[in-house]
Amino acid sequence: MSSPQPDTRPIPVRLGSLAWPIIGINVLTVLALAVDTAMCGRLPNADTALTGLGFATQVTFLLMVAMIGLTVGTVANVARAHGAGHDERINHVLLQGTQLTLALGLIVATFGNAIASPVLVLLGASPENLGAALDYLRPTLTGSAFIYLNILYAAVCRGVGNTRIAFGVSVLQNLLNFAFNYGLILGNYGLPALGVEGAAIGTVASHVISSGVMIWLLRRGTLPMIRMPLRPAPVDRELASGLVRIGTPAALDMVVLNAAFLSIVGMLGRIDELAVAAHGIGLRIQALAFVPGMSISQATGAMVGQALGRGDVAEANSVVKASLVMCTLIMTAVALPLIAAAYPIVALFDVAPDSDLAGFTVLWMKLLGYCLPIVAVYITFAGMLQGSGDTKTSLRINLVATFALQIPLSWILGFPLGLGAFGVWLAFPLSFVLKAALGIWVWRRAEWAKVGDRI
């Protein structure tokens, strides 16, 4: 055991220092898919390629839910061990997490490839688009273990309070992804032009190399508290059970969120197909707009876990308070251009400003903008609950707000009250009001600080 050197900087400074590289990592994740999309858009069969890529991305996300849960459980355990100064425990969690990630990657590669075709058909892929979707999906699923390892190691680094290393490796991965895909998608550098399949192969190759670099960095002692063990060890059933206990509700949280968005799409499809297209554009904008807040939430979770590992509940509360202020201010700053410059932003997607599609998209964007400050409040508490390991409470909040409020309210506002797409969308920000209120109530009860005692 060793005691980590205390960080005497003010909590907001520490939180910001931990959060900004996470923001960079999350932005790069979004940009990596944008690069693939842009290059596939230059193919002769661009429409088919992009449609297939869209279907494949949905399946990839659905199959990644389990890895998201494992990541949340890993951060909670590593942060707690780091706060308590248990370096041996950190390395034990790291090794067990690596083995579980490799096993999960093997399961996803095997099971995912077996069900890929029927799932794509179920999602609505036509025979023409099915081939393109499988061209991207099969190599991606086969190499999923390397993609997952990068996610895991970034989470471990976050748990011990260092996000800069993971950010540097993410930059390398994105550069490699661009270089490989430029060659393999379009046939540059004398490489074969593999189209959508080349996008998948290039992406997996970039993750193979970057995960190897991360293992090398962790092995050589770049982080003093980590000595990456490579010798396999028996599965620690108690730890694995704990990771499942914390991670399963976090994974189900993502399933609930996905169900909420699917319900919106289903309702919009009954109103106007252009509203569905507008929703798709809005989700791309939302993916970037949510990045700062989600990143601060992830940093909050790590710092809360570290504080609870030291038995310092007062500091954990101070972290939450600092996160509330920082997250709300930053998300409000993001909201302003979404509201004030909605039409110019929509024009970036080659949407005619006087079209019905532009009208629907701007309406959805402005609703997103108005709800961002209240979203900031909720995701702060989501980070707090994940850091403490109280993911069951986070799931309960999401279940109540989604199934008791958002989905039924979307239907009531959209159809019986005749508000159309506006009504369907309006329920989304209103659900976050309930989520934020429940988050505040849970925070003040302080039961979340006691859950960590059982990690």
Image (cartoon, rainbow, N blue to C red):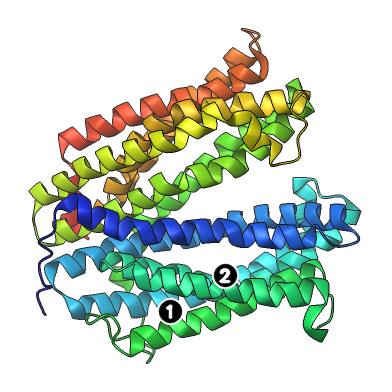
Location of residue 4 by image quarter? bottom left
Give x and y (percent) for residue 158: 32, 65
User: In this orientation, which residue lies closer to the viewer: 426 or 61?
Assistant: 426
Amino acid under label 1? Gln
Q: Distance between the residues labelled 2 and 1?
A: 25 Å
Tell me where residue 132 appears, x and y as whole percent.
83, 61
Residue drawn 19% across and 48% down? 319
Q: Name the residue under label 2.
A: 174
Identify the residue at horizontal 52%, vertical 27% (top origin).
339
The picture places residue 31, in percent across and down from the top left corner, at 59, 58
At 39% from the left and 59% from the top, the residue drawn is 22
Tell me the residue at 64%/8% (across/down): 416
- Residue at the far top: name it: 417
Q: Is mark 1 on a helix, strand or loop?
A: helix
Say which label, 2 or 1, has the lower sequence index: 1
What quarter of the picture does the N terminus occupy? bottom left
Amino acid identity at mark 2: Asn
The quadrant in which residue 94 appears is: bottom left
Question: Can residue 55 be seen?
Answer: yes
Q: Mark 2 or mark 1, which is nearer to you?
A: 2
Q: In this view, does 427 lie above or below 394?
A: above
Name the foreground residue: 152 vs 259. Answer: 152
Q: Mark 1 points at which residue?
A: 99
- As helix, strand or loop, the secondary structure at mark 2 comes to helix
